[in-house]
Amino acid sequence: MRATALIAPLLLLAAAAQADEGMWTFNRFPADQVQAAYGFKPDAAWLDRVRLASVRLAQGCSGSFVSGEGLVMTNHHCVHACVEQLSTPEQDRVAQGFLAKARPDEVKCPDLEVNQLVKITDVTDRIAAAVAGKSDADANAARKAEMSRIEKACATSDAVRCDVVSLYEGGVYDLYEYRRYQDVRLVFAPELAIAFFGGDPDNFNFPRYALDSAFVRVYEGDKPAATPNFFAWSEAGTKAGDLTFVTGHPGRTSRLKTVAELASFRNKALLRRLLWLSELRGALAEYGHRGAEQARHSRTWLFYVENGLKAYRGEAQALLEPALLAAKEAAEKALRARVAADPRTKDAAGAWDAIAAAVRKGEDLQIRYDLLERGRGFQSDLFGHARTLVRLAAEQARPNEERLREYTDGNLPAIEQELLSAAPLYDEFEAFKLAWSLTKLREQLGPDDALVKQVLGNETPDALAARLVKESTLKDPAARKALRDGGAAALAASKDPFIALVKAIDAEARAVRKAYEDEVEAPIRKNHELIARARFALEGTNRYPDATFTLRLSYGAVQGWPEGGRMVEPFTTIAGAFGRHTGADPFALPASWLKAKDALDGKTPFNLVTTNDIIGGNSGSPVIDKDARIVGLIFDGNIHSLGGDHGFDARLNRAVAVDARAILHALDRIYGAKALATELRGR
Amino acid sequence: MRATALIAPLLLLAAAAQADEGMWTFNRFPADQVQAAYGFKPDAAWLDRVRLASVRLAQGCSGSFVSGEGLVMTNHHCVHACVEQLSTPEQDRVAQGFLAKARPDEVKCPDLEVNQLVKITDVTDRIAAAVAGKSDADANAARKAEMSRIEKACATSDAVRCDVVSLYEGGVYDLYEYRRYQDVRLVFAPELAIAFFGGDPDNFNFPRYALDSAFVRVYEGDKPAATPNFFAWSEAGTKAGDLTFVTGHPGRTSRLKTVAELASFRNKALLRRLLWLSELRGALAEYGHRGAEQARHSRTWLFYVENGLKAYRGEAQALLEPALLAAKEAAEKALRARVAADPRTKDAAGAWDAIAAAVRKGEDLQIRYDLLERGRGFQSDLFGHARTLVRLAAEQARPNEERLREYTDGNLPAIEQELLSAAPLYDEFEAFKLAWSLTKLREQLGPDDALVKQVLGNETPDALAARLVKESTLKDPAARKALRDGGAAALAASKDPFIALVKAIDAEARAVRKAYEDEVEAPIRKNHELIARARFALEGTNRYPDATFTLRLSYGAVQGWPEGGRMVEPFTTIAGAFGRHTGADPFALPASWLKAKDALDGKTPFNLVTTNDIIGGNSGSPVIDKDARIVGLIFDGNIHSLGGDHGFDARLNRAVAVDARAILHALDRIYGAKALATELRGR
């Protein structure tokens, strides 16, 4: 089944995208294509309005303004960490849900940042000029420096976030200018039992019955922000066959990667990641058996791990289908032949081999890079804070454009927010995470590795982790602030064991990063740019770029799909949720639902599926109709969509959403959320 | 590196095996080949003597007689479960080690069975006659019935075990007749800290420093059995370049499988197994954090899981190398062309396609088959006992040759031993294992599956598992015996919840097994027999069959291998172990070693590597010289050998062994095991 699902579109990669396929940028949206397929042509005003009503949750989700007073709709699983952070042993808001009856009851989420895309500017020529005539490694550094320069000039205040984004694997560089909101407060989150009804067993499956929705509000100067561009609510909702748009921030696709990149990813990095997450899943789930508090502390992470595992597993299954790589190989071969034969593009003829060589080099460096530089060998928030403190001091001493990209001025507000966050840390959980990852560090680098010996000394991972967490002062945001304010001198004087650990491995972590950037990233980027320009020359620009966690618009329709010889219906109902209720987790409806049962209209549509082309990062995206009214809220994809990193099949791939009618019905009849419902209705 | 390692021999698969490659049967041993390579030709008497001194541990290991009084040498990790079962909270024999100072101190291992291969008879013609003219499914049933008939006629008492084994994927059927020993007593096991020094990090690596050795003794009539065929001990040991033989029971290789079988295994079953074991590893390791007792109860299983995981992971890496499957494809294509062109073999021309079709069918059935029939969804020994009781009663009511193969008369002694075993069961651990596997049952079949709903009802896996374990009486061997003795009537009256569970799913488990056997196993077996006969016709019989956990002999030499531009030395020393000692697990030498340090000769060889072709199941195999004297004890392979399921490269693949001199030195100087050392020395 999956082979058929994925091959069809791949064979068409060289041509235009097929109906409903595509995560399109707002400045290159194929309005005529939508007109041809659905008889509706979004104009510039419509696109601007939709863009400005769409938001990104900087930590990895999408959302939308749904009132003029800063109200943002997103998924429960996008704010799960916040709800967890606002919980205590006495008041478990994840389990019990949260509703601010009035504005003063809205509580600040320690770590959330909301971005609204206000402007897109093409800066391809500036980047091209900066890298011209340079070696791969020098060009890579020059590219980053130029990006930092452009971003700094653009970001005139902390409320402006500017990112130069690479699209079409470097074929286009656009400057994305965002309005940044860091005061984000929780308004409503239902009980986890209904937000994630069906749990991991139902995740990525359909029929489905989940109220995976939440509302937060962005504030400015301690007041709700004015957000004149927002989506109105459709009380009538949508029906099978209706045109639907999804606006949001798909995180990553790999549809333009070369076969060498895909094969290497599948055989090495992906397999390693799958085994890592599986083992971590087992450890985390069992950690929760230590006690109720430990279960509470670990459940958010467990959710992310299980969700990621299921997604990666789907991706692995797609990449293991011999037919998929074979189709990609055939397409690549054909493109290479055209590129080599055409005088306009023949400078790109060697690009594929150059990428393959860099990929092999990457395989040698990847494990060390992940463990040391990406910190996977030191999975504790305390290590993260210590790393930030040490590097912040070092990087701020350098000119903006020479810094590591994540420490440029434009990123300082986000760094600051995370570093000084009031989110609670739990000693036992930090020690558990760190000990587990130290075990992996030793396993993957080997016990004879000099760095492993230096880190572990004569201690076991368990003993070392427990000691570091016990002795560290970084659990206290004030201690972190003091070190941040004190800069290099304070860090030099610090006796904190995490600061010492970070310092001890920093030279090696930076070295492996530099090697990776110079020897892997630089040639891959340079050669992908060559391929991208060759494609534009040969195939034109009527294409969508791979997902990059930037704003995209997808069009499609409400539609089921064929499975096992029958059609899966596109809607479920609230009555269906009661039919699925067993009383045992994860199939236990919360008390509020059981109590309200008689007051509910069982026929109310609950979840639905559409043909929109989405992927992870689209979580929290609104589903809107042609009048740009909210008819649903994306929270998942069906099982076929898990191969979506590598292709799209309109016949089988489906986006899964909460029906807007279910959200309003629940707010009205179950949660008594009068003020919120009124605000959504706009009256 | 791995690609080179594995391709070379594969390209030669159609020709004779390369030097040192091969797990040869004793009745088709290539003595001339050894003569040509090493100047020594084993004769029939030598082979008989070696065969009779070799034993199998029926649960999955190898061993050897090392005295005339039933003394058996094997690995610590082969008797780890026994040592665990003989431990208590007060006396942790795994941690402290065990030494029987005199015969009366030797303690019975509840579950061990030792087999000595006394005779091999070719029964290929009888099997061929039984299946002639039948459909695939009928032939499959007839084949099994004939095997059961042959075995029953052969097994004249419980002390005789007879197995018809299929070799060359069905090209040859041989009857293996064993002397069976079920009274096996522990004589010596060192502390786990030195038996498994370096733990999982060092596992499958070298240089290595582990005393992974143990001694047990087989008894007859409550007296040490007389075992006139045994290996003498070589006090002089071996040196680089010396010819070495390894005799033992390699468990499984897949060197003759078709490309369709390998690709399916890699993409589906192997990936699923890797993720399963990874998650279980995480859960088990964390379960050990519940407390010291829980750690003790779970560590044996954790060891098996980690060991299996590392082995499967090496296998996955081998199968993911595109070059490996490409080489196998090329070899298969060439063979198919020859088979189709030759009138003697052309009836086998369609065999590969028929196998591919059956493999696809197998993919559909495999998950259910593993979970229900193999019991992976119900991982508790209590479920295992209940399954045995229910099926034993049902199967014993049938004629021997119509029974499920594992319930034929020849297997009853083994079933009995396990069912009535005094090995302790721990409620909390049983509940943990069962709950975890029920979670996987729900995950893999889906929460809507009728059987899942029937099993779980409205309970969570945790709650159901805890309840079943609490209510069951099967923890008591006496209760199991009563049900065994009471037969069908007793089972009908039983209120035990595990008996009820087994009964509830038995019809479906049997149905999926029948479907699997008829639709997958039967056509695969039939068509592999066709291929095997075609190969014999085209290539002759100078080949070795894939491993099947039957006795094999491998020849090779003591030799290091090139790694990273230098040669790895073939020996380590006892001094090296002290150099590696950090004091922290798994690099902490036991107190007995630290105390004896000054009495030890640091130059004593500790571990060594040889070019013998071995795989899992060879654990516990003796390494012998041309005079059939013990010079070492196999316990592992190097990292390159992990692809050994699919090929062998004499340049890189190495067997890892404990040096015989280290064993004797430790018995003399550390353990004061005077009687044992004297017995080994034969004086």
Image: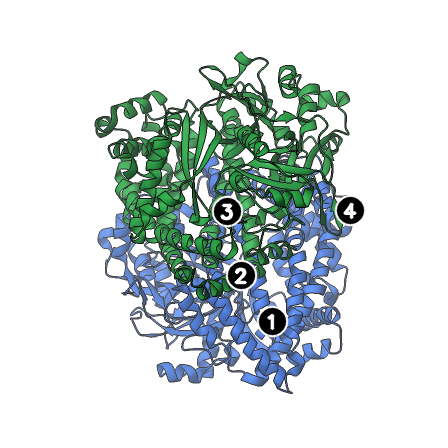
Chain colours: A green, B blue
Q: Earlier in the sequence, mark 4 or mark 1?
A: 1
Chain of the residue on which disc 2 is drawn: A
Whether marks 3 and 1 lie on the same chain: no
Cα–Cα gap, marks 3 and 2: 17 Å
- Element marked by disc 4: helix
The chain carrying label 1 is B
Q: CA distance from mark 4 to mark 1?
A: 36 Å
- Whether pointer 3 and pointer 1 mark residues with C-beta atoms closer than 8 Å, the reply is no
Q: Is disc 4 in the same subunit as disc 3?
A: no
Q: Amino acid at mark 1?
A: Val
Please identify, in this view, whether the residue under mark 4 or under mark 3 is nearer the observer: 3
Q: Earlier in the sequence, mark 3 or mark 2?
A: 2
Q: Residue at x 51, y 82 (%)?
A: B542
Q: Is residue A620 visible?
A: no
Per the image, label 3 sits on a secondary structure element best described as: loop
Q: Nearer the viewer, mark 3 or mark 1?
A: 3
How far apart, in angstroms, are the residues tagged by discs 3 and 1?
Answer: 55 Å
Identify the disc placed on residue A546: 3
Residue kind at label 4, given as amino acid type: Ala
Report which residue position mark 2 lands on. Answer: A331
Residue B165 numbered tag: 1
Q: Residues within 10 Å of mark 4 (few under 14, many from 20)?
A: some
Q: Are marks 4 and 2 in contact (CB under 8 Å)?
A: no
Parent chain of label 4: B
**Residue B281's x, y, as percent?**
49, 46
The answer to whether A446 appears left or right of A30 in the picture is: left
- The label shown at residue B261 is none
Image coordinates of residue A666 in percent, x first then y, are 68, 23
The one of A435 and A132 positioned closer to us in this rendering = A132
The quadrant holding residue B72 is bottom left
The three-letter code of the residue at mark 3 reads Asp
Callout 3: chain: A
